Amino acid sequence: MDKLERDAAAWNPAQYLKFGGERLRPGYELLARIDDDLPLGPAYDLGCGTGEHARAIATRWPDRGVTGLDHSADMLKKAAAAPKPTNLSWQQADVAGWSPPPTPPALIFSNATLHWLPDHGALFPRLMQMIAPGGTLAVQMPGNFRAPSHTLIRDLALTPKYRPKLGVLTEPGGSLRDDLVQTPDFYYGALAPLAAAGGIDLWQTTYMTALTGERPVLEWIKGSILRPALDRLDQSERTAFEDELAARLAGAYPRRADGITLFPFRRIFMVARRG
């Protein structure tokens, strides 16, 4: 993934949190599946965003240091504006090159972040190797890269009008690829050699999110998967791209008679205990 796609200035906390309850819910459900009896050691929230899950982790385990780490200064500024437990700190860093201090973490938690990073076959074993024996890796990522909300962006990006600027996002390492998140079987295979016996909890959930407004699915994806594409366009191109995409999305996700647009929000979860 190139630097522009991870550019901290590109993230907009207000846009992301337009659907804050829906976006944060999977992370809280992930957190609820982690056992209380973690070994000694610090905890890290990789890609902590505006910090809600990091605060929950610090409150649940008050006897250990917790670090919320994100590459976006804007997200961390929003996080720092809210009250926090005394055992919680913030760190600006790129998750792609992160490694913890010498004390092995008892918990590495990551909600809706690791799909932005390439080569999960190497990434997930590397994260597991960082964790203290008996510690936990807990990850949640989107599992809808082959859904219309994503394929329609790719289709439009590859039209002659937009391909010169956006075609690169469909190439290896680009954010519009459909293979950024693999199958559950893939992640089981990546984690099992380092996990305790019976220590992998792996599941998928599809949330049927009720959206309202004139262009509800467009507004949803502007806070996540659409952001790198829009960053590459100038203002007039961006407006035209959004208008064309909104029309295509309206066909794929029709509005109900009651004004609600149901949007399937599919996620993959994993909680792995280190052997």
Image (cartoon, rainbow, N blue to C red):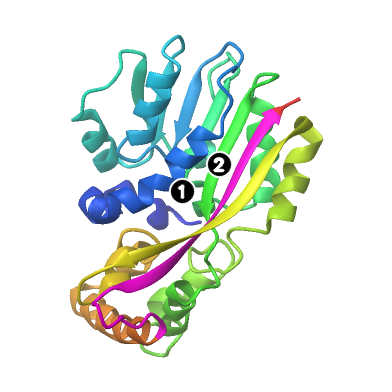
Q: Which residue is mark 2?
A: 139
Amino acid type, residue under disc 2 in the picture: Val
Work out whether residue 231 can be spotted: no
Give the residue displayed 65% in from the left and 19% down from the top.
Answer: 132
Q: SS for tag 2?
A: strand
Question: Nearest the camera: 223 or 63?
Answer: 63
Residue 235, by quadrant, is: bottom left
Give the residue displayed 60% in from the left and 58% down from the top.
Answer: 181
Q: Which residues are magenta?
A: 252-273
Work out whether residue 274 can be spotted: yes
Q: Tell me where residue 113 appears, x and y as whole percent.
A: 47, 47
For marks 2 and 1 on the same chain, the one whose residue lies earlier in the sequence: 1
Amino acid type, residue under disc 1 in the picture: Ala
Q: Tell me where residue 210 appears, x and y as whole percent.
A: 33, 65
Quadrant for the C terminus in the image: top right
Crowding near pointer 2: few (<14 within 10 Å), some, many (20+)?
many
Depicted 114 relative to depicted 86: above or below: below
Residue 24 is one of the magenta-drawn residues? no
Q: Which residue is mark 1?
A: 112
Depicted 34 relative to depicted 264: above or below: above
Give the residue displayed 69% in from the left and 54% down from the top.
Answer: 184
